[in-house]
C-alpha cells in the first residue's frame, strides 16, 4: 500500500495543543506529514475520511498486567484477592498462560492501546517475554510490549534467607535479565490487601535497594516497584527505580524527591482498581466493609488528595494499572483517563498527553512514539468525537473507527 491520508477530521497530535482541522499522512510504518487544512491527495494514495472524528496517537498503557486472567468477556472470579485466590490452586500451564496473555493483548489492542509497559507478570517464568516477542514478530496481535518479571517481595520464608540478602537480590535481578525481561518488579512495600497495615510495611532495606539498583544498571534492565509508604518511595527514587507505582501515602520529602527526579522516572497510581473496589465490586464480594479492610477506601482518598499535587509539580503520572481483575477487566483501561479528570483535576487534553506522549517516554521510545509527527511510528486512532474535550469517548471501542499500529490497520481501513 502506498501513502495513506487521514483527512476531513480534527488532529490531536499528543503534544497538548488544541485539536486542529488537518490531516495525517502515513508512508510505510511511519508518519510522513501532519498538516493543517486539507489538501488534494496524491495520485494513488489511500484516503481515509475522518469527518466528525479525531485522529490521535495510539494509547499507551503505563502499568500493564497482561498475564492477569480477567478481560472483557472473560471474567475470572477465582483471581480476586483477598476474596478468592483459588486460581492459584489450579494454575494454567505455561502454554495455557501464554494463550491467555495473547487473548488479553488482542483485547487491549482492540481498546486502542497500541503499546504497553508492563508492571509485572503474574507468575515466575518468561511468558511475558514470549508474548512481547510474538507481538513484535507479527505472530499475534497486541500492543508493543516492555516485559516485566513477576512481582517479588522480600520474604525469607518464601525465597530463602540467602536470597533476601543484597547479594541474593542482585543475583535474582541478573537471572530475570537473562530470561529476557526489560524490567524487574519489586514490592518495596507490602499492601493492605495482603495484611492489615501492609501498605506501611517496607519490605527491603536500604542496602538491599541499593544492591538492586546497582545490579539493574549492570544487567541493563529497569526497576519498577510497588511503593505505598513514604520510606519505600524514597528508597525507589534514591536507587534509580524507573517506575514507582501507587505512591498513595507519599509525604512532603517523598514528593520533593519525586519532583527532583521527575525527568528520570514515572509514577502510576492504578486508580482504576481503587475506584472499582470502592464503588463497583460488590458483585465480586467486595462491599464497603471489605473495601475498607483492603485499604481501598483509604488509598482512594489519599490518591485523590495527593495526585493533584503531583500534577502541579509536573511529575509524569501515567494512566492505567491493575486491570486484569474481575472488577477491572483488561479492555476497560481507558476508564483511567476519565478518573484522572474527575478525581485528579487533569484536563481531558492533559490526560491524553499522559496516555500518549508520556507513554512513548515510558516505553523509552521518545522521538518515535506517542505523538503524531513526521518520522514517528504510525500508531494512531481515528475516534468519533473529540476526546480532548471528552475522554469518555475512548471507553467505547465502537467509537474507534480505525486502530493503526506501525502503519498497519488493526481495525478499519480501506473497504
Image (spheres, rainbow, N blue to C red):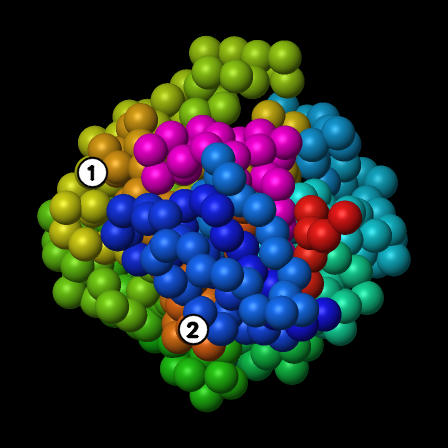
Residue at which label 1 appears: 308
Q: Position of residue 24 (x, y in %)?
A: 48, 60
Look at the picture and state if 82 lies above or below 93: above
Query: Mark 2 or 1, which is nearer the eye?
Result: 2
Q: Quadrant of residue 357?
A: bottom left
Between 214 and 364, the one lying in front of the other is 364
Is residue 200 shown in magenta? no
| Residue drawn 85% across the image and 40% down it | 90
| Residue drawn 75% across the image and 73% down it | 137
How far apart are labels 2 and 1 at the CA level? 33 Å
Look at the picture and state if 18 lies above or below 197: below
Between 322 and 212, the one lying in front of the other is 322
Residue at which label 2 appears: 374
Q: Secondary structure at mark 2?
A: loop
Look at the picture and state if 297 lies above or below 341: above
| Residue drawn 50% across the image and 61% down it | 40
Q: Position of residue 392 (x, y in %)?
A: 45, 29
| Residue drawn 65% across the image and 82% down it | 178
Q: Quadrant of residue 208?
A: bottom left
Circle 1: is it few (<14), some (14-19), or many (20+) Cα within 10 Å? some
Left of 345 or right of it: where is 147?
right
Circle 2: is it few (<14), some (14-19), or many (20+) Cα within 10 Å? some
Look at the image and give the residue range highlighted in magenta.
383-406
Q: How many marks?
A: 2
Query: Residue 166, which numbered label?
Result: none
Asked if residue 219 shows in the view, the reply is yes
Is residue 395 shown in magenta? yes
Q: Secondary structure at mark 1?
A: helix
Q: Position of residue 167 (x, y in %)?
A: 48, 80
Does label 2 or label 1 sit earlier along the sequence? 1
Q: Residue furthest bottom?
A: 218
Amino acid at each position: 500500500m502506498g501513502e495513506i491520508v487521514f483527512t476531513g477530521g480534527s488532529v490531536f497530535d499528543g503534544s497538548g495543543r488544541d485539536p486542529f482541522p488537518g490531516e495525517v499522512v502515513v508512508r510505510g510504518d511511519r508518519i510522513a506529514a501532519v498538516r493543517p487544512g486539507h489538501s488534494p491527495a496524491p495520485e494513488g494514495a489511500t484516503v481515509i475520511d475522518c469527518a466528525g472524528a479525531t485522529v490521535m496517537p495510539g494509547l499507551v498503557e503505563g502499568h500493564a498486567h497482561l498475564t492477569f486472567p480477567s478481560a472483557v468477556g472473560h471474567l475470572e472470579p477465582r483471581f480476586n484477592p483477598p476474596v478468592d485466590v483459588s486460581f492459584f490452586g489450579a494454575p494454567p500451564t505455561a502454554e495455557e498462560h501464554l494463550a491467555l496473555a495473547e487473548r488479553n493483548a488482542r483485547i487491549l489492542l482492540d481498546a486502542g492501546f497500541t503499546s504497553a509497559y508492563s508492571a509485572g507478570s503474574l507468575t515466575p517464568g518468561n511468558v511475558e517475554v514470549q508474548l512481547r516477542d510474538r507481538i513484535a514478530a507479527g505472530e499475534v496481535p497486541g500492543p508493543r510490549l516492555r516485559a516485566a518479571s513477576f512481582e517479588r517481595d522480600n520474604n525469607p520464608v518464601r525465597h530463602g534467607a540467602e536470597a533476601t540478602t543484597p547479594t541474593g537480590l542482585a543475583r535474582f535481578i541478573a537471572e530475570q535479565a537473562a530470561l529476557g525481561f526489560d524490567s524487574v518488579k519489586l514490592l518495596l512495600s507490602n499492601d493492605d490487601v495482603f495484611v492489615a497495615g501492609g501498605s506501611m510495611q517496607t519490605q527491603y532495606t536500604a542496602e538491599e535497594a541499593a544492591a538492586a539498583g546497582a545490579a539493574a544498571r549492570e544487567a541493563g534492565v529497569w526497576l519498577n516497584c510497588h511503593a505505598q509508604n513514604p520510606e519505600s518511595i524514597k528508597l525507589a527514587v534514591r536507587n534509580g527505580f524507573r517506575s514507582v507505582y501507587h505512591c498513595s501515602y507519599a509525604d512532603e520529602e517523598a514528593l520533593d524527591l519525586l519532583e527532583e527526579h521527575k525527568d528520570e522516572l514515572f509514577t502510576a497510581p492504578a486508580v482504576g482498581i481503587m475506584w472499582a473496589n470502592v464503588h463497583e465490586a460488590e458483585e465480586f464480594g467486595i462491599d464497603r466493609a471489605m473495601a475498607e479492610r483492603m485499604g481501598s477506601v483509604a488509598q482512594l482518598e489519599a490518591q485523590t488528595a495527593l495526585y493533584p499535587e503531583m500534577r502541579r509539580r509536573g511529575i509524569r503520572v501515567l494512566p492505567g494499572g491493575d486491570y486484569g481483575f474481575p472488577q477491572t477487566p483488561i479492555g476497560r483501561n481507558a476508564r483511567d483517563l476519565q478518573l484522572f479528570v474527575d478525581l485528579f483535576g487533569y484536563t481531558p487534553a492533559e490526560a491524553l498527553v499522559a496516555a500518549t506522549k508520556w507513554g512513548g517516554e515510558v516505553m523509552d521510545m521518545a522521538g518515535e512514539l506517542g505523538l503524531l509527527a513526521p518520522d514517528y511510528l504510525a500508531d494512531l486512532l481515528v475516534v468519533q468525537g473529540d476526546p480532548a474535550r471528552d475522554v469518555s469517548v475512548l471507553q467505547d471501542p465502537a467509537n474507534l473507527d480505525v486502530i493503526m499500529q506501525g502503519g498497519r490497520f488493526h481495525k478499519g481501513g480501506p473497504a
